[in-house]
Amino acid sequence: MDYRHEWKHEITYLDLLCIRQRLRAVASPDAHAKDGRYLIRSLYFDNLYDKALNEKVDGLNMREKFRIRYYNGDTSFISLEKKSKHGGLGTKYQARLSAEEAQRIVDGDIDWMMESGRDLVQELYCKMRYQGIAPKTIVDYTREPFTYAPGNVRVTFDYNIRTGLRCTDFLNPDCVTVPAGDPVILLEVKWDEYLPDIIRDCVQTPGRRVTAFSKYERCRIYG
């Protein structure tokens, strides 16, 4: 189990411009980005008692959440992900899904999952069946990603966060989403064993403190 360090900061647009300029001098744009950015659509899961949401709000030291995700409207590559947190460290498990499989999960047609041959799909099945977790809401946002090989560093800017309210029509490109509260720009820095000084210097934001911001929590603002 490989845990990664993670920092999050809420920053201003001026901060973004300054940090972006510094990163362009030393880091590489993500190879999958188009014009330096991409659109992310995620469908988050929770149970009737909002277990994942409440664990986040309460700041529990150990917690997990499931989501399904695709990029730039391309449903030919869909990923089921489980994110686990232990203190300030995080790890992520992934499994591929076809568009048909993702839609079946959204529709509650899940019996096939135990025969899928994918551990994470089987785990999600068990938690849907016995813990009552189910698709909860869509989270859309724009991401600008940078990578730096030493330390396996990834720096991202996330903004234009939108919520599908209670909509779970995840594969429908016309599903209506609305802004998730006041506009926010989120800087995230993730690394393995060490954070190189050159990146630490690039992302310095005087007066900004590490935050526990959650896009899922923000997108549940309306219920």
Image (cartoon, rainbow, N blue to C red):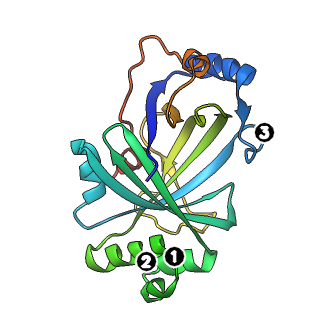
Find residue 77 and report its horizontal and vertical position in percent: 67, 65
On residue 155, the disc is: none
Between the residue at mark 2 and the residue at mark 3, the CA separation in whole angstroms equals 37 Å
**In front: 155, or 164?**
155
Q: Earlier in the sequence, mark 3 or mark 1?
A: 3
Check if mark 1's residue and mark 2's residue have beta carbons within 8 Å: yes
Q: Circle 3: is it few (<14), some (14-19), or many (20+) Cα within 10 Å?
A: few
Q: Is residue 207 left or right of residue 197?
A: left
Residue at x 34%, y 55% (from the top left corner): 64
Q: Position of residue 160 (x, y in %)?
A: 56, 40
- Measured along the vertical axis of the image, is residue 38 above or below residue 152? below
Quarter of the rendering containing residue 30: top right
Q: Which residue is mark 3?
A: 35
Q: Is residue 221 visible?
A: no
Q: Quadrant of the C terminus?
A: bottom left
Residue 36 visible within the image: yes
Given the image, on which type of amino acid does mark 1 rest? Arg
- Report the side of 60 relative to 96 (left or right): left
Secondary structure beneath disc 1? loop
Task: Identify the residue shown where x is 22% and y is 63%.
Answer: 49
> x%, y% of residue 220?
36, 51
Which residue of the protein is positioned furthest toward the right in this rendering?
35
Mark linked to residue 118: 1
Residue at (56, 63) in percent of width and height: 175
Alpha-carbon span between mark 1 and mark 2: 6 Å
CB atoms of marks 2 and 3 within 8 Å: no
CA gap between label 3 and label 1 equals 34 Å
Q: 1 and 22: which one is in front? A: 1
Q: Which residue is mark 2?
A: 122
Q: Is residue 39 left or right of residue 209?
A: right
